[in-house]
């Protein structure tokens, strides 16, 4: 039985690079810190707009409000993201 038949969450998904901040980081994002790859297992919000990330390895990392990083994220290209803002179509004269 293939992963798609078993209902695997990764069936039909692709991995893409996304820019993340304190407000956009998600569980299961994979981030590179100091040349090491970490996968976010959990996170908690801290005072001052900070967020503490807990990785599957047991290590933690605290993002401050101004932290901008790149992460690898699995997405399903068949599902339209509600966060994508597309420009309105212009009428052709």
Image: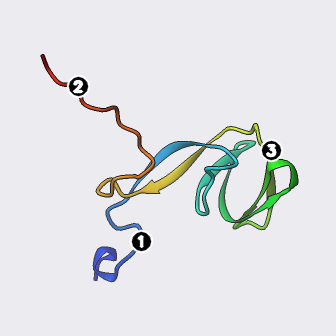
State the residue at coordinates (84%, 57%).
46
Q: Nearer the viewer, residue 5 or 50?
A: 50
Q: Quadrant of the C terminus?
A: top left
Disc 2 residue crowd, few under 14, some 14–19, many 20+, Cα 10 Å: few
Of residues 80 and 54, the one drawn nearer to the viewer in this rendering:
80
Tell me the distance, in whole angstroms, between the alpha carbons under discs 1 and 2: 38 Å
Residue closest to the eye, 19 or 85: 85
Report which residue position mark 1 lands on.
9
Q: Earlier in the sequence, mark 1 or mark 2?
A: 1
| Residue 29 position within the rendered picture, expressed as x and y whole percent measured from the top left | 59, 56
Q: How many marks?
A: 3
* Left or right relative to 33: residue 18: left
> In 3D space, how far apart are the residues under numbered discs 3 and 1 (Cα atoms)?
30 Å
Quadrant housing residue 91: top left
Q: Nearer the viewer, mark 3 or mark 1?
A: 3
Q: Is residue 33 above or below residue 80?
A: above
Horizontally, residue 81 falls left or right of residue 37, namely left
Tag of residue 22 = none
- Residue corresponding to mark 2: 90
The quadrant in which residue 60 appears is bottom right
Task: Identify residue for label 3.
Answer: 64
| Mark pair 2, 3: CA separation | 40 Å
Pick whichever of labels 2 and 3 is earlier in the sequence: 3
Farthest residue in the left direction? 93
What colour scheme has been applied to the protein in the rendered image?
A: rainbow
Q: Residue furthest right?
A: 47
Residue 72: % across, % down? 54, 49
Residue visible at 66% across and 61% down? 40
**10 Å neighbourhood of mark 3: few (<14), some, or many (≥20)?**
some
Q: Earlier in the sequence, mark 3 or mark 1?
A: 1
């Amino acid at each position: 039985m293939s992963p798609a038949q078993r209902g695997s969450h990764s069936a039909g998904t692709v991995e893409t690079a996304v820019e993340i901040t304190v407000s956009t980081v998600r569980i299961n994002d994979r981030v590179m810190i100091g040349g090491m790859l970490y996968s976010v297992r959990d996170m908690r919000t801290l005072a001052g707009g900070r967020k503490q990330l807990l990785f599957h390895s047991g290590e933690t990392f605290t993002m401050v409000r101004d932290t901008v990083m790149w992460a690898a994220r699995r997405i399903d290209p068949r599902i339209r993201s509600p966060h994508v803002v597309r420009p309105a179509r212009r009428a052709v004269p």
